Amino acid sequence: MNEFTKIILGNYEPLEKKGKIFIYGIEERVNSSIDFIRNKYKHYDEFKIAIDYIEYFHSDTIKADIDSLFKLGYYPATETEMELDHSIKHALIG
């Protein structure tokens, strides 16, 4: 019986089982995903530009007048950053 089967058939509570399934083979999945993105994803250059934009420039584009900040705060900007971050993480771990 392999390790994954032991997790599936094991006597774990549901949350613990989900956690164990989530991390099972995660390093291999991440490395495989990175290899695919770097070497086979046809929009890799645009992908790198998007990441660089979010990492280095996006926070500078926030409209800083008091009315906008009072109404929205930093919500649209932080939401954009979080959505890209979550999407990338999801792509990496499968």
Image: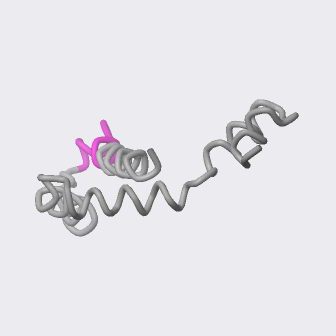
Q: What stretch is highlighted in magenta?
A: 66-77
Query: In the image shown, does 3 or 36 lie closer to the viewer?
Result: 3
Quarter of the view holding residue 22: top right
Task: Give the dominant element type of the magenta stretch: helix, strand or loop.
Answer: helix
Residue at (73, 49) in percent of width and height: 3
Q: Position of residue 12 (x, y in %)?
A: 84, 36
Q: Position of residue 6 (x, y in %)?
A: 78, 41
Residue 1 relative to residue 82: left or right = right
| Residue 55 appearing in the image | yes
Q: Furthest residue to the bottom?
A: 56
Quarter of the view holding residue 59: bottom left
Quarter of the view holding residue 33: bottom left
Residue at (42, 63) in percent of width and height: 31
Residue at (62, 51) in percent of width and height: 23
Q: Does the magenta stretch include residue 65?
A: no
Query: In the image shown, does 89 or 38 lie closer to the viewer?
Result: 38
Query: Is residue 71 positioned above or below 88 on the image?
Result: above
Residue at (12, 53) in percent of width and height: 42
Q: Where is residue 80 in the image (x, y as percent from the top left)?
A: 29, 45
Query: In the image shown, does 89 or 10 lie closer to the viewer?
Result: 10
| Residue 73 appearing in the image | no
Q: Quadrant of the N terminus?
A: top right
